[in-house]
Image (cartoon, rainbow, N blue to C red):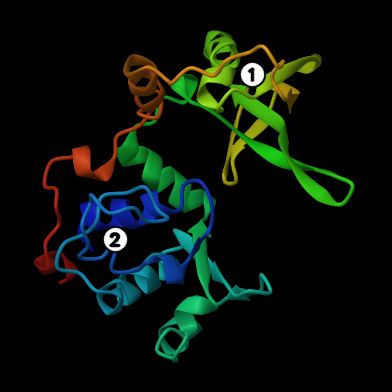
């Protein structure tokens, strides 16, 4: 398989397992100015049927693993026949193995110390969503987290940080991706809260938006590498 095509496929799954149904025309021969569930550059001239044998090859080489909706793993030898069944894209998903993560890293050259990531868990009150979250943010670089916290209200439509809930720790071995752990990771947990009534939300300035997007460039994307885009000849 063409190395750039392989990297594009691996890159899809660096953050979470990818259901095959997301490999839609939006990212296979689609337009990059149209929104889609995966924030990637689309392949031109490829179809879902083109990608099936490539994904099977990645599974056979131990770089990705497949599972069904019940999270039961699918053996590589069964994939080709399963993916020919109608509706298979609604049942199967793939994720990186540890070897797949290392293969992705070898080309993406991630600067892990520049990465800041995290997630919010929606809070429920009286059986209903409150619109607020319990947050976990993490980074190997303390200053990055401090900047994220400082600009939190602007980046989250005015929601505030409940300062009484902030808890900061340093983890010796922390899972930053489902397949990757790093040493010495700063972890901050907090709850969001509604702003005071006198607080007025201002539109996010363009320079802050640019900074926010620049922070996501802590690794080389496939479309930033020489040889992009891969053509159909790379299938053979």
**Residue, far front:** 198
Q: Is residue 12 left or right of residue 195?
A: left
Q: Which residue is pictured at 39% across the width and 30% down the height?
A: 110
**Inter-mark Cα distance, 2 to 1:** 36 Å
Q: Is residue 37 above or below residue 174?
A: below
Tell which of 158 and 116 is nearer to you: 158
Q: Which residue is pictured at 42% across the width and 20% down the height?
A: 204
Residue 220 percent location from the top left of the image: 29, 34
Tell which of 11 and 236 is nearer to you: 11
User: In this orientation, does residue 16 appear?
Assistant: yes
Q: Which residue is pictured at 39% across the width and 73% down the height?
A: 56
Residue 194 percent location from the top left of the image: 72, 24
* Residue 184, disc: 1
Tell which of 112 and 157 is nearer to you: 157
Q: Is residue 37 above or below residue 224?
A: below
Q: Is residue 167 left or right of residue 178?
A: right
* Residue 27, disc: 2
């Amino acid at each position: 398989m063409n190395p750039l095509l392989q990297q594009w496929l691996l890159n899809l799954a660096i953050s979470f397992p990818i259901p095959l149904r997301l490999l839609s025309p939006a990212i296979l021969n689609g337009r990059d100015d149209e929104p889609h569930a995966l924030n990637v550059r689309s392949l031109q001239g490829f179809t879902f049927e083109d990608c099936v044998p490539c994904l099977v090859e990645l599974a056979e080489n131990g770089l990705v693993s497949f599972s069904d909706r019940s999270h039961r793993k699918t053996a590589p030898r069964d994939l080709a026949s399963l993916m020919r069944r109608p509706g298979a894209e609604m049942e199967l998903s793939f994720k990186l193995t540890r070897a797949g993560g290392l293969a992705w890293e070898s080309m993406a050259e991630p600067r892990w110390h520049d990465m800041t990531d995290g997630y919010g868990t929606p809070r429920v009150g009286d059986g209903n969503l409150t619109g607020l979250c319990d947050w976990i943010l993490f980074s190997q670089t303390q200053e990055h987290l401090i900047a994220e916290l400082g600009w939190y209200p602007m980046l989250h439509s005015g929601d505030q940080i409940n300062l009484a809930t902030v808890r900061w720790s340093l983890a010796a071995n922390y899972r930053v991706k489902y397949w990757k752990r790093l040493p010495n990771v700063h972890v901050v947990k907090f709850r969001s809260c509604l702003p005071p009534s006198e607080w007025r939300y201002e539109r996010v300035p363009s320079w802050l938006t640019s900074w926010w997007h620049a922070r996501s460039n802590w690794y080389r994307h496939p479309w930033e590498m020489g040889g992009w885009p891969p053509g159909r000849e790379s299938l053979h």
